[in-house]
Image (cartoon, coloured by chain):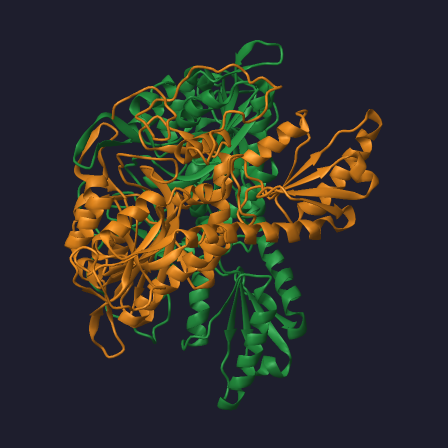
Chain colours: A green, B orange
Amino acid sequence: MTNRPSQNDGEFGYIYVSTVKDEAPDMNQTFVTELTKKSEDLSRWYTDVILKAELADYWMIHGFQVVRPYGYALWENIQSRLDARFKATGHRNAYFPLLLPGSLLEKEAEHVAGFAPEVAWVTAAGSEELTERLAIRPTSEAIFGTMYAKWIQSWRDLPLLLNQWCSVLRWEKATRFFLRTTEFLWQEGHTAHRTDEEARDETMRMLEIYRDFVENDLAIPVIPGQKSEAEKFAGAEATYTIEALMPDGQALQSATSHFLGQNFARAFDITFQDQDGVRKNVWTTSWGLSWRIIGALIMTHGDDSGLIFPPKVAPIQVVVIPIPGKAGDEQAVRDAVENARRSLAGQFRVEVDLSDRTPGWKYSEWELRGVPLRVEIGPRDVRNSQAVLVRRDHREKIPVPLANLASGVQDTLDRVQTSLFQRAKAFLESRVARAESLADFQRILKEEPGFIVAHWCGSAECEAAIKAQTGATIRCLPFREPREAGVCIIDGKPSEKRALFARAY
Amino acid sequence: MTNRPSQNDGEFGYIYVSTVKDEAPDMNQTFVTELTKKSEDLSRWYTDVILKAELADYWMIHGFQVVRPYGYALWENIQSRLDARFKATGHRNAYFPLLLPGSLLEKEAEHVAGFAPEVAWVTAAGSEELTERLAIRPTSEAIFGTMYAKWIQSWRDLPLLLNQWCSVLRWEKATRFFLRTTEFLWQEGHTAHRTDEEARDETMRMLEIYRDFVENDLAIPVIPGQKSEAEKFAGAEATYTIEALMPDGQALQSATSHFLGQNFARAFDITFQDQDGVRKNVWTTSWGLSWRIIGALIMTHGDDSGLIFPPKVAPIQVVVIPIPGKAGDEQAVRDAVENARRSLAGQFRVEVDLSDRTPGWKYSEWELRGVPLRVEIGPRDVRNSQAVLVRRDHREKIPVPLANLASGVQDTLDRVQTSLFQRAKAFLESRVARAESLADFQRILKEEPGFIVAHWCGSAECEAAIKAQTGATIRCLPFREPREAGVCIIDGKPSEKRALFARAY
């Protein structure tokens, strides 16, 4: 760990927090003059908006971040909506330890090879050296596997469907807020089953839960499919993924679900006595989604004015802003705002901005912070018994009678949710190109980068060659591609289906 | 870290999980013949009931535990009810990093002296040695303090009221499930204020929230008060506590709230520009409650048959058990049970036990697991259009018309909640004794151990002398004790108020 001064260049540095005090902000300034335009520099905009909207901040140690209340409220909403889906499908939460002996990681050979380079090691406690070094969990297959071997005895104990919400550590070199952090919060599901089929069904069920959640709640369209051998999880038989596309045409792996076969069952001796009296290895799965999805959310929906949060997970869904009029109108406006707050509070996550800033300043602030709907109430509105709803996504103004405010808000939030998804979906589909040759592939990546669907023979060599020559990797073998006879764009050998390629986060 | 075979003697050992497979259980056996009697051996009962009810299990590393789904559901209920109280008082959640540089811990001198002996150190990542070793957080004052110095600029930024739910590590020698574990889950609140008074008010507000939660939701009576200098948090100006009393007469510190004065503000340079234009240090507080409270819950309410959970936090509040009759009655019973489930499901956490075990086996199992209310439905009940409610705490049987089942259940759960508290409260009060001399003090501890209220001059020497001679420590200077002129039971010097003593967990 080395130290450099605090920086703010879109990439985490080796930083120490500055203790220099800035001047108190000038109260008359516009809120966000300095926000980089998303359309001009996505990477810098991304860092700017996270810092200015106070979603997260740098920590003193390379690659670690602090998630501030506004960012954490988003994570809480993500957690609660996803957790409800897990519980509805019979999963239960538990908590497994942070540390595991190094020897345990090594039980599954591919698994340790995949994770050992990223593991943080605890070697001392108090003033004593430990006799065996302990790993901070980079993922918990080895930990769950050890306990499953103890808990599972009979076919009656199956399936065992557990999940945990926790933090894990993977020592990363190049890091970005949310997208790639050394410590991250996530959930990891680990399940054990009696049969191959049942474990495969579980793997696909969880992938579909992720797809449904990410598309319907986060309004991020994705392409589901299977990872190639080179890209699959260390120790898995098969890894499935949902892949999103960011505005710069780079893919972002949004969640993964792994069919682990009997690899971990053999490595950790997880057996059960089946109904036929025979002792057998279980079949296991694991699946995870991390706060990385917040990075996808920010990039997918935001614009030059800042964040745009889909209503279903927005920390604040509605901000009510009074428009001051002449001195005599003040009380009437204040009463109308208070009535509006009351009629919305039970049903929505509402903020009322009664600060002494100008309305323009408030608009900018709440736009920056991504609140999907603004409710303006001024003297004229009070006289007309109405409020004006302003959508964050395209600033359409919708007058609504105060008497119907709650239903007008619900209706508009629903429209925002739908239209964010449709806009992102249209963008994604406009950036799925079909390449018939390597030249084609390279031209597309240069002219309008995005997903490229191309024939690939299935060999690791051709996969590596494409990566070396274009920087693009196989994101998945997408379910939506039909079987189609073709030839690999690298070696010309026969291919039965196209793979989905992209440069990726 | 050394290794010993797995053990189960009420104390965590240095253990590795056994991989020996037990035989599949004999399905005809009674569920819990082997449970130690609580009345005979509290310590062994405690470990037995945790393992048998599947609240938690041992992990391979000394002092770590795995919290199983049933135990974690309890923690989730504790979290959600306490979190709602935090949010209702203006606190917001955030997430701060797991690791901090060793140098940061050292900024507050008393703080590092208190925690350094318990810290786990990360010294390597992947194959590289770190240039500065990193501590796994034992608590996060230093981490929050560092960020608060950056975020707080003006009096407008105050108060800053944050909380986090996370895991922390304190390397412990003697460990017990929940009560003392090397890694534990907790919440830690950290707040910064403009004035001394405001910070003191916050400290007391949070103590009162803990008292209210622990007494009303967990049904554990407590005595609130202030810690002595020797027992206060490392770095605090004053520590406040709520102290519970376990059935063996030992006290259990259940939550603490610390007034930190300006100690951390000075150490971490947390300053703000006040309304008068002068730059000043903030005043801070911190407060925490951990999964240790689950240990208190288990010991306070359980009995020889197993756990008893207060309804407000019980993972399962009601279990419905069909009583099979003659062959012809089966369908009618099954229908009535299904109707009962439907009428209860929206309002309560309900389990229906349709397994092929005998009713007696089911009674034992759900009693062991602490479900506060059982609903029995048999053929005769169906004919009488009733169900029989059986309270877990004293097994009273209450017939309730099926048409009023939900209200009958609600009413009975309310009674169980109240009576668990009253029973524990009566026990606590019966074990608060007043000692007028050291001989008195020692006699009480021998005859009927519990809280002892005695005069103490206020000196650290006398406090240490009592501890050395009796094993009892000052649990707090209880708010409920009036000022009263007396003399210290050790050195005979004047005392103005009695302290609360006990041996403690």
Asked which quadrant contains residue A195, the reply is top right
Q: Quadrant of the N terminus of chain B?
A: top left
Task: Report whether B427 appears left or right of B275.
Answer: right
Q: Which residue corresponds to the image point at 57% horizontal and 49% vertical from the top-left? A: A421
Q: Which residue corresponds to the image point at 41% horizontal and 56% vertical from the top-left? A: B210
Asked which quadrant contains residue B269, the reply is bottom left
Comparing B344 with A374, the one in front is: B344
Q: Quadrant of the C terminus of chain B?
A: top left
Does the rendering let one see residue A248?
no
Comparing A398 with B198, the one in front is: B198
Task: Report whether A385 appears left or right of B171.
Answer: right
Q: Is residue B432 above or below residue A227?
A: below
Task: Report whether A205 appears left or right of B425.
Answer: right
Asked which quadrant contains residue B387, the reply is top right
Residue A87: x percent and y percent?
57, 39
In this view, which residue lies farthest toward the bottom? Answer: A328
Comparing A147 with A265, the one in front is: A147
Residue A458: x percent and y percent?
48, 19
Q: Is residue A331 above or below residue B251?
A: below
Task: Report whether A28 appears left or right of A86.
Answer: left
